[in-house]
Image (tube, helix red, strand yellow):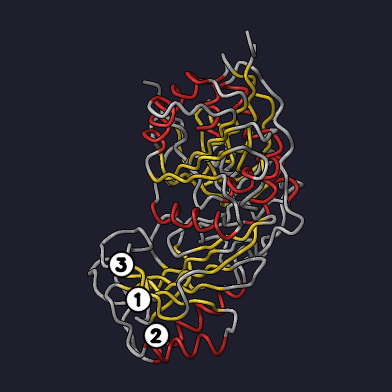
């Protein structure tokens, strides 16, 4: 085994030769890789090694000796400690190029067809784009309640400053709830002792409708002076359409529990995406950046070239957002999703929008897809998938390769699993285009739409 050329707690001067998938800088000392958060390709930096593993190490910047042209002053006070955005130190246009390059380098490594990834579609205004905020409530050094964000990689709550990616109303509402907690000396959940009442405040905002949902996550089932709190919130924020008490008494880092109690309004808000209206309930997934989601879906639907003859499968359909976008052009759409509440919402959304050619099925994609194809003999012309970060499972890939739908659109939130899966389809399908979309500006995430068409049709 070769000697590792760096030691923990020692300083080194390095050149940054590249940036990784999450925007981290990459340097090498004697061919040994070091990852450095906040460093940009082309910079020369003095670093302190904070962790050494057998194959790579992690360093942190002590001083930037030569700055990149794309570096900018960070506009956020909690940037260093918050894990929310990791690219605020880079000019926006350049973050878009970095995301395109990250996808391209995966394509070059993994696919036979080295297709040119398209430039990332950015936002005109990449600020305050999130329509869902989740604020943990913790205890500060003086034992008082505090709300904010978890510090990067820990569960210490950093008090909230003006966040540049959240909707400003979310912050105001959360601060009002915090005032109420302080004034009435209501206890705050402590992860170590599993005692205390208030755990999280979650706010969802309809970007087009301005309707607001406020979810109070508690370790118990009663909030002291609950009516007074409802009164304060609804008087101060007339856009609040519903307030929900979410009961989470489990010792878990999952934010929402299963049980919701409406303490004001009917437990959901509506928002518009394209020409459709969607109902959003506390547990249902809705795109966090609807402005970009609309563009993402439009690209996907257009690329699928759906006609009135087509049967479409929408796998991992959530509350049916893209299913409804496609139903307008198709003969029939089948949406599949494992979250029961999401399917209830999807059915309701189809009804609200008078869409009668979409059928929604609750279940594990792997099992439902198998059943639709092999038992019900329903063969789709177009398949749209939008899987979680882990990508598609082998059985679903095998089933899709067995029935060979004519057109296949893969929406992905993780380029690494995307190209892994595309490699499996490459023999049979031509990868037509890969379009990155910037759903989460200034973070390391990149969403992509990939269009595949069947080779050798009709042979």
The residue at which mark 2 appears reads as 181
Q: Earlier in the sequence, mark 3 or mark 1?
A: 1
Q: How many residues crowd around disc 3 within 10 Å: few (fewer than 14), some, or many (20 or more)? A: many
What is the distance, in whole Å, between disc 3 and disc 1 at their CAs?
10 Å
The relative height of residue 140 versus residue 33 in the rendered view (above or below) is: below
Q: Position of residue 172 (x, y in %)?
A: 56, 79
Q: Position of residue 205 (x, y in %)?
A: 58, 68
Q: Residue at x 61, y 69 (%)?
A: 167
Q: Residue at x 48, y 29 (%)?
A: 378
Judged from the image, the secondary structure of the residue bearing numbered disc 1 is: strand
Q: How many residues crowd around disc 1 within 10 Å: few (fewer than 14), some, or many (20 or more)? A: many
The residue at which mark 3 appears reads as 248
Of residue 266 and residue 235, the one placed in the foreground of this image is 266
163 on left or right of 420: right
Q: Earlier in the sequence, mark 1 or mark 2?
A: 2
Q: Are marks 1 and 2 in contact (CB under 8 Å)?
A: yes
Q: Nearer the viewer, mark 3 or mark 2?
A: 3
191 on left or right of 368: left
Q: Earlier in the sequence, mark 3 or mark 2?
A: 2
The residue at which mark 1 appears reads as 198
Judged from the image, the secondary structure of the residue bearing numbered disc 2 is: helix
- Quadrant hosting residue 380: top right
Q: Residue at x 50, y 84 (%)?
A: 176
The relative height of residue 56 versus residue 447 in the rendered view (above or below) is: above
Quadrant including the C terminus: top right
- Quadrant hosting residue 393: top left
């Amino acid at each position: 085994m070769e000697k590792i050329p760096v030691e923990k707690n020692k300083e080194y001067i390095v050149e940054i030769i590249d940036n990784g998938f999450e925007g981290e800088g990459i340097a090498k000392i004697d061919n040994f890789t070091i990852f450095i958060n906040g460093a940009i390709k082309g910079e020369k930096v003095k670093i302190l090694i904070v962790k050494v593993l057998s194959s790579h190490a992690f360093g942190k910047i002590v001083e930037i000796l030569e700055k990149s042209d794309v570096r900018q002053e960070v506009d956020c006070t909690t940037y260093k400690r918050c894990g929310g955005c990791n690219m605020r130190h880079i000019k926006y246009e350049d973050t878009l190029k970095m995301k395109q390059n990250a996808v391209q380098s995966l394509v070059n490594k993994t696919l036979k067809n080295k297709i040119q990834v398209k430039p990332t579609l950015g936002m005109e205004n990449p600020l305050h784009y999130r329509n869902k905020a989740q604020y943990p409530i913790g205890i500060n050094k003086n034992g008082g309640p505090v709300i904010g964000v978890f510090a990067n990689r820990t569960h210490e709550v950093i008090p909230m400053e003006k966040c540049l990616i959240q909707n400003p109303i979310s912050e105001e509402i959360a601060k009002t709830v915090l005032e109420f907690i302080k004034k009435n000396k209501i206890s705050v959940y402590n992860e170590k002792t599993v005692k205390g009442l208030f755990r999280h405040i979650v706010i969802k905002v309809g970007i087009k409708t301005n309707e607001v949902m406020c979810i109070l996550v508690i370790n118990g089932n009663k909030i002291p002076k609950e009516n007074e709190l409802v009164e304060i919130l609804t008087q101060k924020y007339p856009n609040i359409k519903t307030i929900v008490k979410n009961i989470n008494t489990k010792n878990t880092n999952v934010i929402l529990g299963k049980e919701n109690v409406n303490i004001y309004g009917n437990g959901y808000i509506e928002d518009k995406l394209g020409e459709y209206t969607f109902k959003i309930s506390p547990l249902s997934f809705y795109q966090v950046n609807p402005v970009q989601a609309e563009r993402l879906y439009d690209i996907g639907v257009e690329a699928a070239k759906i006609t009135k003859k087509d049967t479409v499968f929408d796998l991992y359909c959530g509350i049916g957002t893209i299913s409804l976008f496609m139903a307008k052009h198709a003969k029939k759409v089948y949406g599949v999703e494992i979250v029961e509440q999401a399917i209830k919402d999807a059915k309701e959304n189809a009804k609200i929008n008078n869409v009668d050619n979409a059928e929604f099925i609750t279940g594990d994609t792997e099992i439902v897809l198998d059943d639709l194809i092999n038992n019900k003999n329903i063969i789709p012309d177009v398949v749209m998938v939008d899987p979680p970060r882990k990508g598609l499972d082998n059985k679903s890939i095998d089933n899709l390769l067995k029935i060979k739908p004519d057109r296949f659109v893969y929406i992905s939130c993780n380029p690494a699993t995307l190209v892994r899966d595309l490699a499996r389809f490459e023999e049979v399908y031509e990868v037509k285009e890969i379009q990155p979309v910037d759903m989460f500006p200034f973070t390391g995430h990149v969403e992509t739409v990939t269009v595949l068409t069947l080779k050798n049709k009709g042979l």
